[in-house]
Image (spheres, helix red, strand yellow):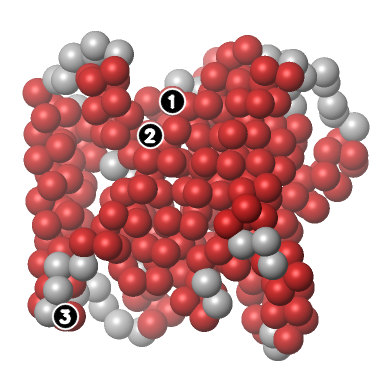
Amino acid sequence: MFFLSALQVYLMAIGANLTFSTASMFFSIFSTRFSPVWMGTVKVALATVAFVIAMFLSGQTNSVPWSVVALLFFSGLGGLCGGDIFLFKAYTTLGAGRTLVMFSFEPLFLGIYGYFFLNQLFTVNQILAVLCMVICIYIFMLERSKLHGSWDFRSFFWAFSGIILDAVGVMMTRSAYEIAPQMETFQANIIRCIGALFGFLLVSPKIYLQFPKDLFRLNTKDKIIIFGACVGGCFISLTLYLAALKHAHVGTLSAIAITGPVWVAMLESIYYKRLPNRYLVGAFVFFLMGFYLMVIA
């Protein structure tokens, strides 16, 4: 029974990573076409509708303490709103593949946080993983310098800001589950989405008047793509990930994050009909080394 439970958690986490990674490529396209705030708002708004429908169809609701509601609300405000805005901003310049490579080093940021604020020691493997991460990022910055004549520090600042905000959101969500283990996944997602929607309203008060008009003007193909990306990249991925997060050790889930950048890099090569360049290949080598040291060795 334990093996089956572990297998289910593993498959849910992989499913979450693959659906989010696939959707990220299209988030990148529409963030460039419109704006990161527009894409984030559409993504969360459509997912919220799906979560509400799913909650009522499942009939699974439990009483949740106000302290947990507050944790999830601010988790959504920071992680789903602020984190997505910065990540989508990075998508528009770095692309989804390169951004997700850096995003997969999120456990290192949690480790650095633990070292400075929780008095947790850094292992030799973690130190070496940090070195691999630095080399990986340097390769991407070198690529930007060769292509555009600039190191483009802003794009990497956006990516790191998104990673940090998402990590904080994950920690707050896990804390909410620790306080209220009876809480259902759909409930947690709805509260987080409400927090994110409130954040988008603060950032751009007119966004809720604008994005329905923009969606209506899209052709049928684009409507299907954006609907599928939002449902897959937010509703399905968050449902699977939070269900896995509720039952699994956070460190175990970190190992599965490797599937994201590898998958989206392959999809980008197929979609854009071009092979990965030497910079991306070199960065992947150090990414794999760092990831091995970070969560496997």
Where does the N terminus fall, quadrant-wise?
top right
Q: Secondary structure at mark 1?
A: helix
Asked if the residue at tag 1 contacts the one at tag 2, i.e. Cβ–Cβ closer than 8 Å, the answer is: yes
Q: CA distance from mark 2 to mark 1?
A: 6 Å
* Front-lying residue, 68 or 240: 68
Residue type of the residue flagged with mark 2: Ser
* Front-lying residue, 138 or 150: 150
Asked if the residue at tag 3 contacts the one at tag 2, i.e. Cβ–Cβ closer than 8 Å, the answer is: no
- Using a 10 Å C-alpha cutoff, classify the residue at mark 3 as few (fewer than 14 neighbours), some (14 to 19) or many (20 or more): few
3 or 1: tag closer to the N-terminus: 3
Residue 141 drawn at (x, y percent): 15, 64
Residue 150 drawn at (x, y percent): 14, 74
* Front-lying residue, 119 or 289: 119
Residue type of the residue flagged with mark 3: Leu
Q: Secondary structure at mark 3?
A: helix
Task: Read off the residue under disc 2.
Answer: 254
Residue 295 drawn at (x, y percent): 27, 30
When asked about the image quadrant of residue 61, the answer is top right
Residue 239 in view, yes or no? no
Q: Which circle, 3 or 1, is nearer the viewer?
A: 3
Q: Residue at x 9, y 34 (%)?
A: 128
Q: Which circle, 2 or 3, is nearer the viewer?
A: 3
Q: CA distance from mark 3 to mark 1?
A: 38 Å
Task: Read off the residue under disc 3.
Answer: 147
| Figure check: 53 above or below 297 | below
Asked if the residue at tag 1 contacts the one at tag 3, i.e. Cβ–Cβ closer than 8 Å, the answer is: no
Q: Secondary structure at mark 2?
A: helix
Task: Read off the residue under disc 1.
Answer: 250
Left or right of 294 in this view: 239: right
